[in-house]
Image: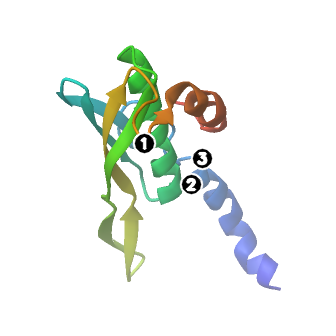
C-alpha cells in the first residue's frame, strides 16, 4: 500500500538525482574552479546544488587541486587549509518550509616541483585514481 502512494514520486526522484552537480567549471549546477593567489599557491572552490553530497565536493576540490598542480608544471601539492562553505537555504514548497543544503568547499593549496614537503600529495596519482570516478560535464 505504501508503494502505491510513493510510486508516482519515483520518476521525480530519478530526475532530481540526475541534476547532481557534474565535475567541471562553475555553472548553474555548481562545479569547481582554481584561482592563482600567489606564485605557487591556489584557491580551489567547489560548490554543488542541493542534490550533491558534500563528500563529492571534497573530491571535486581534491581533483581540481591535482589537475591545477600538473598544469603548473609541478608534481605534488600540499593542502594548507580546507574550509566548509556549505550554505543553508530556506525553501517554501507546497505549503511547507524546508531547509536545503548547497554543499561547498574551499581549499588553499601550495604546489611543489618535488615531493619534499611533509604532507605533499602526488598529483598524478590523484588524477589517475579519482578522475575516472567523477561524473563530468558533457
Helix, strand or loop status at disc 2: helix
Residue 67 in the image: x percent, y percent? 45, 25
Q: Which residue is mark 3?
A: 18
Q: Residue at x 42, y 53 (%)?
A: 49
Q: Which residue is mark 1?
A: 118
Residue 136 in the image: x percent, y percent? 56, 31
Earlier in the chain: of badge 3 and badge 1, it is 3
Residue 75 in the image: x percent, y percent? 46, 22
Cα gap from disc 3 to disc 1, whole angstroms: 40 Å
Extreme left residue here?
38
Extreme bottom residue here?
1
Left or right of 34 in this view: 56: right
Residue 97, placed above or below residue 61? below
Earlier in the chain: of badge 2 and badge 1, it is 2
Q: Residue at x 78, y 84 (%)?
A: 2
Residue 40, placed above or below residue 12? above
Amino acid at each position: 500500500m505504501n508503494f502505491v502512494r510513493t510510486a508516482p514520486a519515483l520518476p521525480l526522484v530519478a530526475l532530481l538525482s540526475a541534476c547532481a552537480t557534474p565535475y567541471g567549471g562553475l555553472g548553474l549546477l555548481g562545479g569547481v574552479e582554481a584561482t592563482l593567489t600567489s606564485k605557487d599557491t591556489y584557491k580551489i572552490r567547489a560548490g554543488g546544488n542541493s542534490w550533491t553530497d558534500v563528500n563529492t565536493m571534497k573530491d571535486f576540490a581534491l581533483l581540481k587541486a591535482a589537475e591545477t598542480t600538473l598544469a603548473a608544471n609541478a608534481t605534488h601539492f600540499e593542502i594548507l587549509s580546507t574550509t566548509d562553505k556549505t550554505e543553508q537555504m530556506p525553501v517554501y514548497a507546497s505549503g511547507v518550509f524546508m531547509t536545503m543544503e548547497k554543499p561547498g568547499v574551499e581549499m588553499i593549496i601550495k604546489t611543489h616541483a618535488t615531493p619534499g614537503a611533509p604532507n605533499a600529495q602526488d598529483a598524478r596519482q590523484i588524477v589517475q585514481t579519482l578522475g575516472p570516478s567523477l561524473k563530468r560535464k558533457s
